[in-house]
Amino acid sequence: MNYVEKVAEERCFVGGGFVDELGGMIIFEAKDLEEAKKIADNDPLMKRNLYTYELFEWEVSVLSNDRD
């Protein structure tokens, strides 16, 4: 969690575990897929092979203007 919290300080993101399924999802900002892969690969849980991930590029279509 410390690594994820550090990334959160640098980038706007949302994340959490799925309610009825194993696993979870984290959405964060990166300039491209290469940078996103570096961020994911540097997670200590990934380095220790405790988890795996799938990386997807997401095109935001709707974003609320009311972001407090």
Image (cartoon, rainbow, N blue to C red):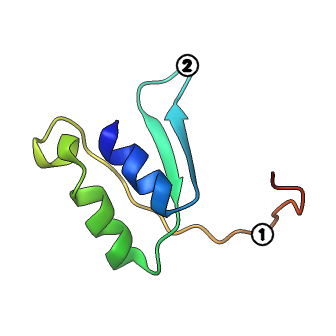
| Left or right of 38, for residue 49 | left
Badge 1 density bin: few <14, some 14–19, many ≥20, Cα 10 Å:
few
On the rendered image, what quadrant is the N terminus found in? top left
Residue beneath disc 2: 20
Residue beneath disc 1: 61
Query: Who is closer to the viewer here, 52 or 36?
Result: 36
Q: Quadrant of residue 52?
A: top left
Say which of marks 1 and 2 sits in front: 1
Expressed as whole percent of the image width and height from the top left, the position of residue 16 reads: 52, 34
Q: Residue furthest left?
A: 48
- Which residue is located at x 78 percent, y 69 percent? 61
Alpha carbons under labels 1 and 2: distance apart: 26 Å
The correct choice, above or below, for 50 with respect to 47 in the image is above
Give the number of marks. Answer: 2
Judging from the image, what secondary structure is the residue with disc 1 in? loop
- The amino acid pointed to by label 1 is Ser
| Left or right of 60, for residue 14 | left
- The amino acid pointed to by label 2 is Asp
- Which residue is located at x 41 percent, y 31 percent? 23
Expressed as whole percent of the image width and height from the top left, the position of residue 32 reads: 44, 80
Q: Earlier in the sequence, mark 1 or mark 2?
A: 2
Query: Who is closer to the viewer here, 16 or 20?
Result: 16
